[in-house]
Amino acid sequence: MVALIPLLPLLGAAIMLLIGRYLPRAVVNLLCCATIAGAFALSLAIPQGEFVFATWLPGIGADWAFLIDELSILMIRLVTGIGLLIHVYSIGYMEHDSGYYRYFGYLNLFVFFMLLLVMANNYALAFAGWEGVGLASYLLIGFYFDRKSAGDAANKAFLMNRVGDTGYLLAMFTILAATGTLNYAKSAAEVTPTWAVAAAVLLFFAATGKSAQLPLFTWLPDAMEGPTPVSALIHAATMVTAGIYMIARSQAIFSAAPKVLGIVAAIGAVTALMAATIAMVQADIKRVLAYSTVSQLGLMFLALGLGAYWTAVFHLFTHAFFKALLFLSAGAVIHSLDGEQDMRKMGGLRKNFPFAFATTVIGTMAIAGIPGLAGFMSKDQILWIAYQRAPILWAFGVTTSLLTAFYMWRMVEMTFLGEPHHAEPHSLPLTMRAPLVILAIGSIFAGWVPLGTPPAHGGSMEYGLMAIATLAALTGIYLAHRDVMLLSPFYFIFRRRWWVDEVLFGLFARGFGQGGGGMLAAIDGGVVDGAVEGAGWLTKAISRVSILWDSWIVDGAVRFTGTAIRLASYPARLIQTGSLQNYALAILAGAAAFLGWALTR
C-alpha cells in the first residue's frame, strides 16, 4: 500500500507520455485523476513506520525506503489532495488547449517526484525527488513552449534551482563524511555542532532556491508563464514547500546550529517583507499571488529559524488551501476573460461572476489573517513565537501582515469592484467550481486542525498581540481601499522589485558570467596558451641548439675523421691508382731497380 502511493501517479505519467496522444480526452481525464485519487485514498489509511523495498547504495543508509510519520503523512495528503483538486480543475481549464495528454502527464510526473521527496527515509532518495520536481516544474512552466517568455521562465527556474541544489549535494557529502550514513534517523543520532553548522548552512542554501527565498526568489514570479493550475500546484502545497519540509525533516541538524537558525529567521523575515512590498504594485493578477507566495514562505522560514518547526508546517498546511484557492480563483477569472491577466483591464466582475468573487474574498480574508479563518490561526502562532523570542522579527511579521492585507484587497478591488472594462465573461464548468468550493471550506476550517504542539498560551498578552495583528490586517484593507500606494515615496523602488533581478544579473550573468568568462579567457590566452606557446618556443630553442651541436660537433667530428683519413691515405692513393698497366710498370721498374742494385753490388 505504501509503495502504491507514488507508483500510481508514475503509472499515469508513463501512460500519458507514451501513448496519451492516442487516447480520448475522457480516458485521459479518468486515468490521471483516478491515479491521484487512488494515492490520496491510500494516504488516508497509510500505516506509520519505515519500509525498505530494495538496497540501493549499501553501507551508507541510502536504500529504496520510505519513512512514514506524522510529517510525511501530512505532506502526502496535501500533495495528493491538493493535486487531485488541481487535476479536476484542469479538466475544464485546459479543455481547449493542445497537448492535453502531455499536460496531464507532466502533472502526474510532478506529483510522483514530490511524493518521492516527502516519503524518502534518506537524503539520497529525497534528492532524487528534489531534482525530479525541478525537472517536472521546468516542463510545466515551459508548457507553452512556442512562447519565448515561457521558455525563458522555465530556463530561469531550472537554472536558479540548480544553483541552490549544489547546496543540497554538498550537505549530503558533509553528512556522509561526518556520520557515514544518509539515513535521516541515523544521521540525526550522531549530530554534533562541529559539522552541523556546515550541513545546516548548505541545506538552507538549497532551501532558498527551492522555496524561493532571498536571493534566489526571482524565478518564482516568472514561473507564472505556465498554465494557472500549474501555478497553483507549484505555489500551494508542493514544490515551493520542499525547502520548508527539508528543514523541518532535518531539525536535529538545525537545532545543533543555533546561529544558522538565526540566519534562517532573518532571511525569512526580510524576504517576507520585501516580497510583500513588491506585490503591492503588481498589475498582473498571477504575479501578485506569486510574490504573495514568496512572502508567506518567508513567514514559514521565520518560524523555522525560531525553532518552531511544527508551527512552520502548520502555516504550510493552511497556506496550501487558501493559496490554491486564490490561484484557482484567479484562473477562473483569466479563463472567463479569454486569458486576460492584467488587473487594470478588469473590474466589475462581482456582478457577472459572484462565485469567483466569493471564493477570492474567502482566500483573501484567510491570507490576510482575519480571525476565525485558517490563515489567522497559523500566522498568529508564528507572530506569538516571534514576539517571545525575537521582537524585532515580530515587527517584520506584523508589517508583512499589514502589507499582505493591502495587496490582496487591492487585487480584489481592481478585479471585482468598480466598473467593468471587458466583455461578458464566460461561465465556469462544474469541474472548475467544485475544487473551488472544497478549497474555500479548507481556507475557513483548516486552521482548526490540531498539528504538533501549540505554543504555550500567553494570556492577555497573546490576545493583545492577536488584536494588533488583526488591526494591522484591517488597516491594510482600508489603505488598499483608499489606494494610498500611489502616494508612497517608495513606489518606484517597489515597481523595480528592489533591483534584485538586476543585482543578480550584474553579479552572476555579467560578473561571474561575462567577467569571469573574460578572466578565464585571459587566463586561457595568457597562461594556458602561453604555457603551450612557451613550451613550443622552448622546444624550438632546444632544437636549434641540438641542430648546432649535431652539425658542428657530431657531424664535425665525423667530417674531421674522414678528412684526416683522406690526408693520411693520400700517399697510398698516389700508388693505388686502380690501373693494371701502372701496376705492371711499377713492378717492372722495381724489378729493374732491384736488378741494377744487385749487379752493381
Image (tube, rainbow, N blue to C red):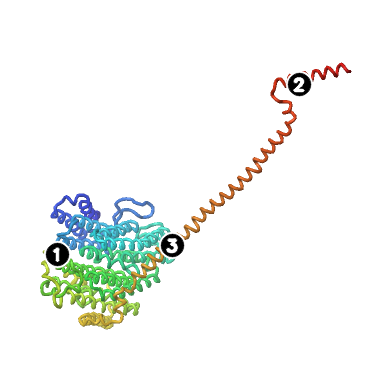
The x and y percentages for residue 490 are 31, 80
Q: Is residue 73 left or right of residue 92?
A: right
Instruction: Check disc 1 and report the residue beneath it.
Output: 432
Name the residue type under label 2.
Ala
Q: Nearer the viewer, mark 2 or mark 1?
A: 2
Q: Is residue 505 left or right of residue 231?
A: right
Name the residue type under label 3.
Gly
Local crowd size for mark 3, using a 10 Å CA cut-off: few (<14), some (14–19), many (≥20): some
Q: Secondary structure at mark 3?
A: helix
Q: Are marks 2 and 1 in contact (CB under 8 Å)?
A: no
Local crowd size for mark 1, using a 10 Å CA cut-off: few (<14), some (14–19), many (≥20): many
The x and y percentages for residue 132 are 29, 57
The x and y percentages for residue 148 are 26, 61
- Image point (45%, 60%), residue name: 520
In this rendered view, identify the residue nearer to me: 475 or 445.
475
State the CA–CA distance, disc 2 to disc 3. Answer: 89 Å
In this rendered view, identify the residue nearer to me: 488 or 433.
488
Q: Quadrant of residue 423?
A: bottom left
Instruction: Check disc 3 and report the residue beneath it.
Output: 518
Local crowd size for mark 2, using a 10 Å CA cut-off: few (<14), some (14–19), many (≥20): few
Q: Which mark is residue 586?
A: 2
Q: Earlier in the sequence, mark 2 or mark 3?
A: 3
